[in-house]
Image (tube, rainbow, N blue to C red):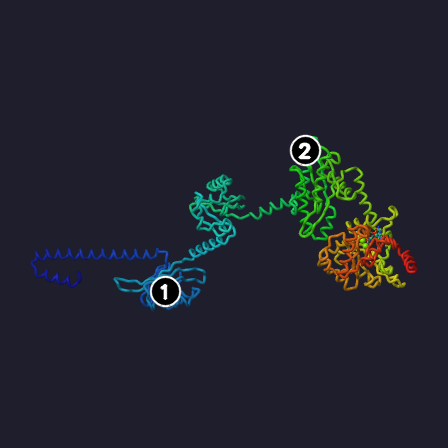
Amino acid sequence: MDDNEEEALLRSAAILTSGAILEARERVERELHQAKKLLEERTAELDHSVSMLRATIESTADGLLVTDENGRILCHNQLYLRMWPIPTELMETGSHQALIQHCGSLLKDPRQFELSVDEIYAEWPLESFDVLRFNDGRVFERYTKVKFVEGRNVGRVWSFRDITQRGQAEADKAQLAAIVESSYDAIIVKDLDGIITNWNAGAERIFGYRADEIIGSSISRLIPPDRVEEAARIMSFIKQGRLTEHFETVRLGKGGKAIDVSVTISPVKDSAGNIIAASKVARDITQRKESQERIRYLAHYDSLTGLPNRALLADRMRIAIGNAARYSYRLALLFVDLDRFKLVNDSLGHDVGDKLLKIVAERMQSVGRQTDTISRVGGDEFIVLLSQIANAEDAARIAEKLIAALSQPYTIEEHELVVTASVGISIYPDSGKDTGTLLRNADASMYSAKEAGRNRYHFYSEDLTSGASERLNLERDLRGAVEREEVFVVYQPQIELATGRVIGAEALMRWRNPKRGLVSPASFIPLAEDTGLILSLGEHILRESCLQARQWRDSGAKVIVAVNVSAVQFRQKNFTGVVLGVLADTGLPPKCLELEVTESVVMQGVESVVHKMRILDNHGIKVAIDDFGTGYSSLSYLRQFPVDRLKIDQSFIRDLPDNTDATAIVCAIVGMGRSLGLRVIAEGVETEAQANFLQSIGCEEGQGYLYAKPMEANDFKVWLRNWKLH
Ligand code: C2E
Ligand code: MG
Ligand code: MG
């Protein structure tokens, strides 16, 4: 009720009679009172809702700001002030522009912020959203919406929410997911019923299933039947809350392939700490397992033939000896060594040698019994353990069978090879009671079989041990022989058959030992080669011979000196350097020197041999192939080497001229030499008949007792003078 209405009422009341006036007045006053009360109640109500509103905007998690269409601040909550730390004086000025500038200054990109605010006021969208990044690392979500009152647009509400924490959590989660996905290991999560819920790329790589093929199915698809119990036990540990389990096991990949894995499994808990799943990290260790297996295999087996090696043989011997001792029976050890295997290896290469050894291993296995151990203990050395025999004859029979089987021809690539074997036998308990003695004695008897002419077997006997110690003594005596001047050179002339002219002299090594007398090179050169002593002996002989040839030349005798060179010497890296050094020291012209090498040298390895021979050839030094016809060198092979001369081995000459095989071979060699443009000399010419035959087939040169035995230098000089007179 307003004042005018009140006055009108009073006026009409004065006109009325007093009773009526009074009554009316009272009624009016009552109405007035009621109206006032209503007004008070309305005001209180309004106050209440305003303070409710205030409390509400203060209690939200967002900073709130309300502005009118021009950006003037209508109201805000306290959080807004705190979030943007806005100084009170700035709020008091109420300047829109200053406020925007202040807020922009806190952001990484103030310009963008100001532009977007300007745009909002200019275009006045119903709502708009943005993310604001602060210089101090905080991140806000900004949301603004037009405010309508009774359908009328009265301004905008701006709300700001700090999502720094949420952004961090999301980044962490994304990072974690990326790590899981990029892990080389399999990372799998399964719920407590064993249903797979997570499957990363590593799991796909290891097990072969794609995530969409396997998520939702049971983990039991991966568990081999014999591991089911183990898996269940581990799962029960996890359900009990045991922290982490590590173990190595086998799992099945797609297609049922068994995969060795190392696994770490741990419980997954929800925020309340309840176990809700299990996470499993699995690493493929198949390769590691395989290499462990391989190492175990290599430790006990020979990789070329697959036969047990020395270590496994020794194990089996210990067991066999134990049994033989307990039950009083015999066992035998057969030491099998191929005869002249080195020649095959040197002439035809290691490839052929390896193939031969494999066939040898197969043949030996075909002879042996199930209970026997056939092992390979060295290059061409095999040991057969017969774990139970009745008597020595049993061992002899097996040895014969082995020798027969091994001496059958071998066809390897285009080569037809014949290789024989020598076997040494020791018997428990007769020739030894322990592994070491039995092995040693079988080895010694094998040597005795070789010395007796190879391709046979020998049983161990006491005096064999003395043979082994004899080799040791010989080696001891040979050491220092050069320094003690026990080693010297003898010379054997080489003759041009048609004219009888002396064209050269072969230098041959001699060793005269005070105890032993004159020792044949055939008996000490193999030992010198085995021990490396040949290097110093060979150089000594080369030097002596060159010096001698130089003196002969100086006194008018124009002979070429031919010096034997062992394969071991030729193989030396600096072999050509040594030869050139000796020539320089002695002053012998290189064209006066010929080196005699055997076929095994030629076949050492084409490239390095050709290289060395070219160096020699370039200096004018000649090379002859000694003992030609006894090795495996082929014609086509020979063409690659710069060789000057072939020396037909004396074993062929010996049987001339009556033996048809020998004549055929010698004719072939002479023909071949000619067609290759090589000179050919026959060694070991002892009779006129041989010399005549050689001459008749076009062999131009010879060397042998028919003309002269090897002689010491002084005798050679005398012989030479007489020969010329003659
Ligand atoms: P080789 O190089 O084939 O030497 C030929 C051998 O035949 C020599 O034996 C020689 O004395 C012998 N001989 C020569 N004419 C006749 C003959 O008419 N009838 C018979 N039955 N034999 C004859 P030697 O001197 O005992 O040498 C044996 C082997 O020792 C040589 O065979 C050679 O391979 C090696 N040798 C000798 N001296 C050296 C050397 O200084 N260094 C090297 N690495 N090996 C050498
Ligand atoms: Mg020779
Ligand atoms: Mg010879």
State the residue at coordinates (26%, 64%).
Answer: 152
Snapshot quadrant of residue 7: bottom left
Sequence-wise, the earlier of marks 2 and 1 is 1
Q: Is residue 479 above or below residue 118?
A: above
The residue most toward the top is 327
Distance from disc 2 to disc 1, alpha carbons, whole Å, reads 105 Å
Spot occupied by residue 124 in the image (x, y as percentages of width and height): 32, 66
**Could you say which is closer to the camera, residue 262 or residue 134?**
262
Spot occupied by residue 138 in the image (x, y as percentages of width and height): 43, 60
Q: Residues within 10 Å of mark 2 (few under 14, many from 20)?
A: some
> Which residue position holds label 2?
323
Lateral position of residue 290 relative to residue 149, left or right: right
The residue most toward the left is 17
Number of marks drawn? 2
Q: Quadrant of the N terminus?
A: bottom left
Q: Is residue 584 above or below residue 409?
A: below
| Disc number placed over residue 430 in the picture, else none | none
Q: Quadrant of the C terminus?
A: bottom right
Q: Residues within 10 Å of mark 1 (few under 14, many from 20)?
A: some
Would you say residue 488 is visible in this rendering? no
| Disc number placed over residue 91 in the picture, else none | 1
Q: Amino acid at mark 1?
A: Met
